[in-house]
Image: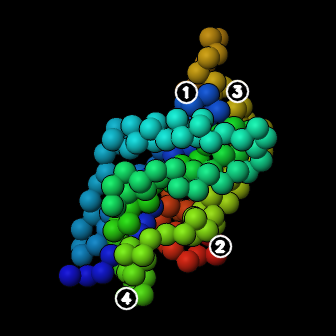
């Protein structure tokens, strides 16, 4: 049996009003096949992390790393990051998500991740979100579910942002210092 290594299963961008702005799923890979993930299941999983964000919410927030939010089982774990605008970034890590490129990389699945292993991914996601906010055609207030007039889609539709999130999700592996 091939050694397995952690990979990102899901990246969720959740608005400051706890509305999902973007959910990206990444299949488990290995041995010539891909196992697709259920979007509804991961939507519920991301929603379950919102109470933990609320319980740990500091008085003042600026790029706050919430670390491990909770482990669903021995395979899946949720990690969180809060931006200074109140947007929550959640990464679901599958500890056996891909075939390990080297035997040393497979040992991480047994030993577990450090919080610092996901910091480069969160920094890259926050940078992608900042670039989205700098786009003059993107209006974050349109994504407020409480808005009654002129409410557009609540999802982020920027192809550039979506491509960057997909790049981060597929490129990340434990031990990376920069994505």
Q: Where is residue 8 in the image (x, y as percent from the top left)?
A: 45, 61
> In the image, which disc is placed on residue 178?
2
Q: Quadrant of the C terminus?
A: bottom right
Comes first in the chain, label 3 or label 4: 4
- Answer with the quarter of the image where residue 58 lies: top right
Q: Which residue is drawn at 64% across and 16% down?
A: 147
- Between the C-alphas of marks 2 and 1, the distance is 32 Å
- Between the C-alphas of marks 2 and 4, the distance is 22 Å
Of badges 2 and 3, nearer the viewer stands 2
Of badges 3 and 1, nearer the viewer stands 3
Look at the numbered discs 2 and 3 and tell me whether their residues touch, using CB distance below 8 Å.
no
Quick check: 49 left or right of 3? right
Of badges 2 and 1, nearer the viewer stands 2
Packing grade of label 3 (10 A; few <14, some 14-19, many >=20) is few
> Residue 8: in sight, yes or no?
yes
Of badges 1 and 4, nearer the viewer stands 4
Look at the numbered discs 2 and 1 and tell me whether their residues touch, using CB distance below 8 Å.
no
Relative to residue 177, is residue 88 depicted above or below? above
Extreme-top residue of the structure: 148
Relative to residue 62, is residue 142 depicted above or below? above
Comes first in the chain, label 2 or label 3: 3
Quick check: 60 left or right of 25? right
Q: Mark 1 points at which residue?
A: 153
Comes first in the chain, label 1 or label 4: 4
Secondary structure at badge 3 equals helix
Packing grade of label 4 (10 A; few <14, some 14-19, many >=20) is few
Look at the numbered discs 2 and 4 and tell me whether their residues touch, using CB distance below 8 Å.
no
Secondary structure at badge 2 equals loop
Q: Which of 62 and 54 is in front in this view?
A: 54
Q: Where is residue 82 in the image (x, y as percent from the top left)?
A: 66, 46
Q: Name the residue under label 4.
A: 103
Q: Residue at x 55, y 30 (%)?
A: 19
């Amino acid at each position: 049996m091939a050694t397995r290594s952690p990979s990102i299963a899901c990246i969720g961008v959740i608005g400051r009003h706890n509305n999902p702005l973007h959910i990206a799923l990444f299949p488990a890979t290995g041995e010539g096949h891909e196992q697709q993930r259920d979007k509804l299941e991961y939507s519920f999983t991301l929603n379950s992390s919102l109470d933990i964000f609320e319980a740990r919410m500091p008085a003042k927030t600026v790029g706050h790393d919430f670390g491990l939010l909770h482990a669903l089982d021995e395979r899946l774990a949720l990690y969180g990051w809060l931006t200074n605008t109140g947007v929550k970034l959640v990464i679901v890590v599958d500890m056996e998500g891909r075939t390990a490129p080297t035997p040393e990389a497979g040992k991480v699945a047994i030993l577990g991740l450090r919080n610092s292993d996901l910091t480069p991914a969160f920094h890259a996601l926050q940078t992608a979100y900042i670039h989205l906010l700098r786009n003059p055609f993107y209006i974050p207030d349109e994504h407020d579910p409480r808005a009654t007039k002129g409410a557009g889609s609540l999802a982020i539709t920027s192809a550039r942002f979506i491509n960057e999130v997909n790049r981060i999700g597929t490129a990340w592996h434990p031990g990376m210092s920069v994505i």
